[in-house]
């Protein structure tokens, strides 16, 4: 599959593509994942996230309609404000992980790769008399994610006045010529700006951020940062098998003050109970081995280890641990600091459960 013009530009700047047969190939790295990781914590790195999918919800009933099917407040979103939420079924099982922003005359929804069709099909079944229409935006728009302690400085240097934009707010950049919208999403426990714009203009904007001081980074580093920050990808770390509170994003994604919505009763019962039987956790490995998806997480007394979870994502790291992983871990073993063993058919390593990487 030939690379697109923007991907060719990245390649000319050192991007290494290890799988060009993807629908949207992504650079694995730009020569040094270690340098990218360090830059993410010291200055700022720039990721191409154009594989993420987006759609607009239009019509006068759009906010009330979506409010009835997801876990967070939609009706009260002011223009240029947003929130994170889960779409759930009647059993409170997760059908989608979304970020919703009020564009003024529509709602803009960002979600994981490959998820738009199933989400739209799910919601469309419930439209009866409501004035609500879906418009897929993925083919037309691309996404860049700039994250790091100097991300705001770099945007300012590039001519984007982002000073007053706080977390879960956005700036619709007037006269950008690309319908650029910059959304503040701190996915990695540090300033992060999700830049959505017409794909035909994305190469120029990427170049302007590079000239302003951003370090280009690939998926190897993105995976490491998201795992260390417990940021899940639906379809990889979460699925319809998971309850909303198992994702460990209750504070960000679930409102317990809003009224009735699909799946609300089981979520309220779990909140009253005080816990779920398993939750998403990060695990720092003592060795440099990167365990495969499906590797078992074992815990317990020596000689009496029991399976308490399964690895869903993993990556090499250049921080506190040489490798990190995500897994849904059973209650009793998911407390931070718990020592676990990661086991596959051919290898084993010790690890430590954590929710925040200090």
Image (spheres, rainbow, N blue to C red):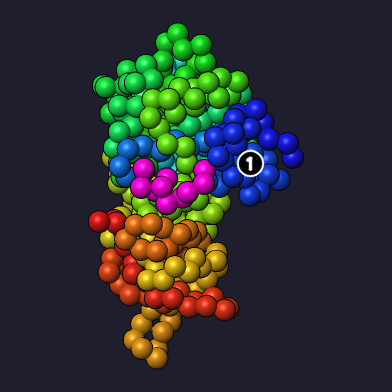
Quadrant containing the C terminus is bottom left
Q: Is residue 137 among the parts visible in the rendering?
A: no
Judge left or right: residue 197 versus residue 272.
Answer: right
Judge left or right: residue 124 versus residue 259.
Answer: right
* Callout 1: SS: loop
Q: Is residue 318 among the parts visible in the rendering?
A: yes
User: How many numbered marks, from 0 up?
Assistant: 1
Q: Residues within 10 Å of mark 1 (few under 14, many from 20)?
A: some
From the top left corner, tell me how far across and down residue 162 is, in percent: 31, 22
- State whether residue 219 is above or below residue 108: below
From the top left corner, tell me how far across and down residue 40 is, in percent: 36, 43
From the top left corner, tell me how far across and down residue 68 is, in percent: 44, 35
From the top left corner, tell me how far across and down residue 22 is, in percent: 67, 44
Residue sitting at the far bottom: 303
Q: Residue at x 42, y 36 (%)?
A: 215
Nearest the viewer among 345 and 73 is 345
Q: Main secondary structure of the magenta part?
A: helix
Judge left or right: residue 275 versus residue 344.
Answer: left
Highlighted range, magenta = 30-40
- State whether residue 147 is above or below residue 232: above
Q: Residue at x 51, y 31 (%)?
A: 143
Q: Residue at x 49, y 65 (%)?
A: 290
Check residue 233 for magenta coloring.
no
- State whether residue 317 is above or below residue 64: below
Nearest the viewer among 102 and 354 is 354
Quadrant containing the N terminus is top right
Q: Quadrant of residue 276?
A: bottom left
Check residue 33 for magenta coloring.
yes
Q: Which residue is mark 1?
A: 25
Q: Residue at x 32, y 38 (%)?
A: 43
């Amino acid at each position: 599959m030939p690379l697109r013009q923007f991907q060719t530009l990245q390649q000319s700047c050192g991007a290494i593509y290890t799988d060009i047969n993807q629908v949207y190939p992504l650079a694995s790295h730009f020569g040094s994942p270690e340098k990218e990781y360090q830059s993410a914590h010291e200055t700022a790195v720039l990721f191409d996230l154009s594989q993420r999918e987006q759609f607009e919800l239009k019509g006068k009933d759009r906010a009330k309609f979506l409010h009835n099917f997801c876990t967070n407040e939609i009706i009260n979103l002011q223009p240029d404000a947003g929130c994170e939420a889960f779409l759930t079924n009647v059993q409170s099982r997760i059908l989608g992980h979304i970020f919703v922003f009020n564009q003024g005359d529509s709602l803009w929804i960002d979600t994981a790769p490959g998820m738009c069709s199933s989400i739209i099909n799910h919601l469309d079944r419930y439209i009866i008399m409501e004035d609500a229409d879906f418009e897929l935006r993925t083919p037309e728009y691309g996404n860049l994610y700039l994250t790091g302690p100097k991300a705001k400085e770099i945007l300012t240097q590039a001519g984007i006045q982002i000073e007053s934009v706080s977390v879960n707010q956005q700036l619709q950049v007037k006269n950008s010529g690309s319908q650029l919208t910059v959304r503040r999403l701190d996915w990695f426990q540090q300033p992060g700006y999700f830049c959505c714009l017409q794909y035909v203009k994305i190469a120029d904007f990427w170049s302007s951020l590079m000239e302003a001081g951003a370090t280009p980074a690939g998926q190897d580093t993105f995976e490491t940062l998201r795992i260390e920050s417990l940021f899940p990808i639906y379809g990889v770390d979460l699925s319809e098998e998971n309850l909303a509170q198992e994702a460990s994003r209750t504070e960000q994604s679930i409102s317990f003050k809003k009224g009735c919505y699909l799946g609300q009763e089981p979520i309220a019962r779990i909140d009253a109970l005080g816990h779920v039987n398993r939750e998403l956790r990060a695990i720092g490995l003592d060795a440099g081995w990167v365990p495969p998806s499906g590797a078992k997480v074992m815990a317990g007394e020596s000689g009496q280890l029991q399976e308490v979870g399964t690895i869903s994502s993993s990556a090499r790291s250049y921080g506190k641990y040489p490798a990190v992983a995500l897994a849904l871990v059973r209650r009793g073993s998911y407390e931070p600091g718990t020592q676990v063993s990661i086991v596959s058919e051919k290898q084993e390593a010790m690890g430590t459960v954590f929710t925040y990487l200090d």
